[in-house]
């Protein structure tokens, strides 16, 4: 994920007027945009949750006791949708590299702990403006609910200030990570990253349709047409309390589209394997969302060579900023619960 940002006082000019705000006492004056979500069961349907989003601690003012400016950092909500812009214009009209990362909060100012073993997670996505080299990421991290672990420089606010980040690359600290979708308009992958203590499967066990030989499956005008919004369904099937399969499906234009499955996730002895990934999902994980690009590899691991149709250098940050300054991702209609329950209408 992107490195720590130095905050510059900004006036947002790309996103205005659409954000509804919620006050969370634990956030020491922080005001978070509301983002309703739904928790579902097969017997009772879907129940709306009182949820909002919070900006990661490292992406806010260097004087961290001050409230964050969400619009200035490229984040806005409208209804059940959150939009994140990579670049935002400052007061002088110059593009600022916002590259935000946010987390889902409950009504008590703690992170929502999604317990997804033998459950599913569904989200609608619009990736149409994301070019080669850009990554709209919707993923899970085994952070603690109150954000008290790895609390940040000022040790204030907990989850209400976006504290406590961790992932399988051991940013912040080491913890299990489940990438539900990392994607742009050209390629996508879903990947499990189990951890056993501080030993994590950094490469992970992933499924990328292009890499699996489905060259006409995902992209503009293809089976999953990325010029239009679509629904992403990720199911975590279990047997006897152990994760056995991770399954990806899509819905677009009213049609269910089956994709890939993951049934193996590395060594249980070293990193926990598929069983360890299931244990993390069973304990509960925090939903994170971000938009970023990659100066080191130009996101080639996602969308170039054997992984996608993009060419070498096409996804460089300088190319994205100059040719696609409006790049943004929209995540909406987030639902989780019993397998088969989140897409019932």
Image (cartoon, rainbow, N blue to C red):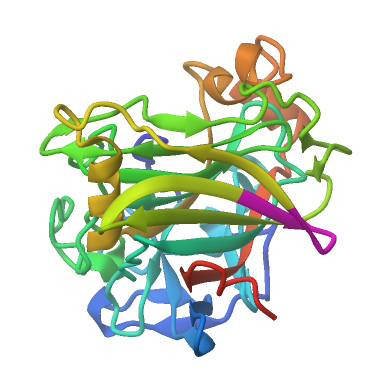
Above or below: residue 310 compared with residue 58: above
Q: Residue at x 82, y 64 (%)?
A: 254
Q: Position of residue 158 (x, y in %)?
A: 20, 66
- Dividing the picture into quadrants, the one containing residue 129 is top right
| Left or right for 252, reference 105 | right
Above or below: residue 126 compared with residue 80: above
Which residue is more in the foreground, 245 or 116? 245
- Dividing the picture into quadrants, the one containing residue 104 is bottom left
Answer yes or no: is residue 97 visible.
no
Q: Position of residue 113 (x, y in %)?
A: 30, 68
Q: Residue at x 46, y 37 (%)?
A: 262
In the image, is residue 159 part of the stretch drawn in magenta? no
Which residue is more in the foreground, 219 or 108? 219
Q: For the view shown, which residue lies furthest in the front direction? A: 240
| Left or right for 222, reference 74 | right
Instruction: Characterize the magenta stretch by its predominant secondary structure.
Output: strand
Above or below: residue 307 compared with residue 180: above
Which residue is more in the foreground, 200 or 133? 200
Answer yes or no: is residue 184 visible.
yes
- Specify the segment rendered in magenta: 249-256
Q: Quadrant of the N terminus?
A: top left
Which residue is more in the foreground, 216 or 127? 216
Q: Quadrant of the C terminus?
A: bottom right
Q: Position of residue 255 (x, y in %)?
A: 81, 58
Q: Residue at x 13, y 55 (%)?
A: 149
- Dividing the picture into quadrants, the one containing residue 82 is bottom right
């Amino acid at each position: 994920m992107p490195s720590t940002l130095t905050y510059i006082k900004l006036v947002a000019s790309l996103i205005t007027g659409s954000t509804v705000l919620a006050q969370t006492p634990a956030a020491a004056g922080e005001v978070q945009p509301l983002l309703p979500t739904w928790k579902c069961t097969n017997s009772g349907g879907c129940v709306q949750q009182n949820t909002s989003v919070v900006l990661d601690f490292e992406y806010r003012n260097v004087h961290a006791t001050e409230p964050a400016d969400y619009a200035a950092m490229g984040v806005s909500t409208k209804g059940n949708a959150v939009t994140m812009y990579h670049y935002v214009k400052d007061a002088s009209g110059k593009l600022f590299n916002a590259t935000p990362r946010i987390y889902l909060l409950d009504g008590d100012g703690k992170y929502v702990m999604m317990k997804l073993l033998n459950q599913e997670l569904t989200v609608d996505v619009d990736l149409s403006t994301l070019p080669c080299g850009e990554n709209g990421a919707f993923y899970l991290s085994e952070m603690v609910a109150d954000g008290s672990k790895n609390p940040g420089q000022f040790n204030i606010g907990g989850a209400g200030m976006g504290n406590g980040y961790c992932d399988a690359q051991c940013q912040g600290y080491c913890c299990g990570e489940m990438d539900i979708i990392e994607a742009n308009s050209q390629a996508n992958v879903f990947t499990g990253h189990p951890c056993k203590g501080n030993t994590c499967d950094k490469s992970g066990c992933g499924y990328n349709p292009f890499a699996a030989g489905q060259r006409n499956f995902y992209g503009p005008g293809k089976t999953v047409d990325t010029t239009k919004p679509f629904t992403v369904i990720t199911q975590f099937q279990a047997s006897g309390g152990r994760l056995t399969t991770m399954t990806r499906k899509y819905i677009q234009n009213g049609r269910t589209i089956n994709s890939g499955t993951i049934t193996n996730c590395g060594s249980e002895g070293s990193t926990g394997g598929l069983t360890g990934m299931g244990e993390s999902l069973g304990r509960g994980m925090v939903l994170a969302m971000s938009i970023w690009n990659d100066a080191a590899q130009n996101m080639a691991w996602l969308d170039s060579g054997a992984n996608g149709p993009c060419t070498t250098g096409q996804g460089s940050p300088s190319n994205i900023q100059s040719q696609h300054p409006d790049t943004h991702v929209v995540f909406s209609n987030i639902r989780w619960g019993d397998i088969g329950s989140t897409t019932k209408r």
